Image (cartoon, rainbow, N blue to C red):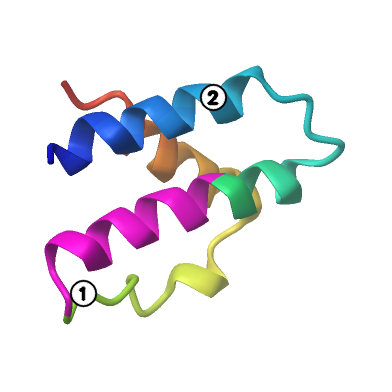
Amino acid sequence: MDFGKAMQGFLLLGDMQNFDTEEEKLKYKQRIVFATMRANIPQWQPPEDWEELSVKDRLDRLEKIQNIK
């Protein structure tokens, strides 16, 4: 299975949802990306400073991952 394409598909579905807050959007995208990373690299961990970043910065990073072809 191509996890990258599946991840992008789920992220696109998330883009069609109307999240009430940026935090909800972040949680959705983070769940998809982090699960995909762990499925491909079982020992993978999020960046150490992830929780210290602003919601906007985290969303920007997740959207960059989403746009990788």
Mainly helix, strand or loop, the magenta region?
Answer: helix
User: What residue does disc 1 label?
Assistant: 44
Query: Which stretch did the figure color magenta?
Result: 29-42
Residue 9: in magenta span? no
Tell me the quarter of the image containing the C terminus. Answer: top left
The residue type indicated by label 2 comes to Leu
* 16 in relation to 4, above or below: above
Q: In which quarter of the view is residue 63 placed?
A: top left
Could you tell me which residue is drawn at 25 percent across and 67 percent down? 38
Which kind of residue does numbered mark 1 sit on?
Answer: Trp
Name the mark nearer the viewer: 2 or 1. Answer: 2
Callout 1: helix, strand or loop? loop
Of 64 and 32, the residue lying toward us: 32
Coordinates of residue 28 in the picture (x, y in percent): 59, 48
Left or right of 54 on screen, residue 45: left
To which quarter of the image does residue 10 belong? top left
Question: Is 31 drawn above or below residue 11 in the view shown?
Answer: below
| Whether label 2 touches label 1, CB < 8 Å | no
- Residue 13, disc: 2
Q: Is residue 1 left or right of residue 23?
A: left
Residue at x 42% of width, y 75% of height = 49
Q: Is residue 16 left or right of residue 11?
A: right
Q: Position of residue 52 (x, y in %)?
A: 55, 72
